[in-house]
Amino acid sequence: MESFLELIRKRRTVRQFRAEEIPENLLLELADLGRLAPSAANLQPLEFIVVSEPEARNRIFPLLRWAAYIHPAGNPKPGQEPRAYIIILVNRAIREKGYEYDVGAAAENIILGALSLGIGSCWLISVDRERVKLNLGIPEGYQVDSVIALGYPAESPVVEEFQGSVKYWKDENGTLHVPKRKASEVIHLNRFGNRI
Ligand SMILES: Cc1cc2nc3c(=O)[nH]c(=O)nc-3n(C[C@H](O)[C@H](O)[C@H](O)COP(=O)(O)O)c2cc1C
């Protein structure tokens, strides 16, 4: 069993999923982890729609844009589409702006919770928000912020050391490589410039 820290280190965005349904109780549990995330002033402006029904998720899929740097190679292949989505909504009556931090915390709770259950995810902000609203009957007063696509992983992307470009790439075997800036470039100890 991997430690929590190892799990966080190994987390990678997944965009290819196995054709296996995620039990509804697990999806509801993940949305509940979003509910329990840190919230500025504890205002809790976020709500969550769990979409798992095949007909509904087929309507959401064309409204999402995947892996812009390598488009269309990063799109889920036919049969490897997500098995569920959690749509993160903002109740504008509670918070008009400044809710993005709350969204980040809730999304990461959901993503890491999913990971602990062996479920892969992709957090998307390239979303046709108006059509998602129409499709899911979301009323005025609510903003669609982002979408977390979920499914059991059918790919295992790997981290690479940053070599001057942030662009991820796929190799000839279809493995996705994701560059990350070096720790020595972004972590300072006790004072700025004192690199680790
Ligand atoms: C706020 C946010 C929005 C994102 N939106 C998209 C998106 O619209 N489509 C997509 O394919 N990936 C999206 N991603 C995933 C990023 O591309 C991915 O996190 C990045 O390439 C680093 O890979 P990693 O998550 O494996 O570390 C988003 C990530 C974040 C944090």
Image (cartoon, rainbow, N blue to C red):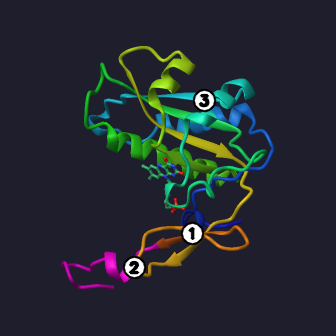
Query: Label 1 to label 3, Cα distance in Å?
Result: 31 Å
The quarter holding residue 97 reads top left
Instruction: Check if mark 3's residue and mark 2's residue have beta carbons within 8 Å.
Output: no
- Whether residue 182 appears in magenta in the rendering, the answer is yes
Residue 100, numbered label:
none
Q: Amino acid at mark 1?
A: Trp
Q: Is residue 47 left or right of residue 101?
A: right
1 or 3: mark nearer the eye: 1
For label 2, the residue is 164
Name the spot of residue 34 as percent of width and height, x first.
49, 38
For label 1, the residue is 169
Could you tell which of marks 2 and 1 lies nearer the N-terminus?
Answer: 2
Which residue is depicted at the point 55% across and 39% down? 64
Could you tell which of marks 3 and 2 lies nearer the N-terminus?
Answer: 3
The quarter holding residue 46 reads top left
**Which residues make up the magenta segment?**
180-196
180 or 72: which is nearer to us?
72
Name the spot of residue 171 as percent of width and height, x first.
65, 73
Residue 50, numbered label:
3
3 or 2: mark nearer the eye: 2
Name the spot of residue 173 as percent of width and height, x first.
73, 72
Label 1 lies in ligand 1 vicinity (Cβ under 8 Å) = no
Residue 135, above or below 9: above
Residue 22, above or below 10: above
**Could you tell me which secondary element the residue under label 2 belongs to?**
loop
Residue 92, above or below 145: above
Q: Amino acid at mark 2?
A: Gly
Which residue is depicted at the point 33% across and 41% down? 100
Which residue is depicted at the point 34% across and 38% down? 39
Q: What crowding class fits label 2: few (fewer than 14 Cα within 10 Å), some (14-19), or many (20 or more)?
A: few
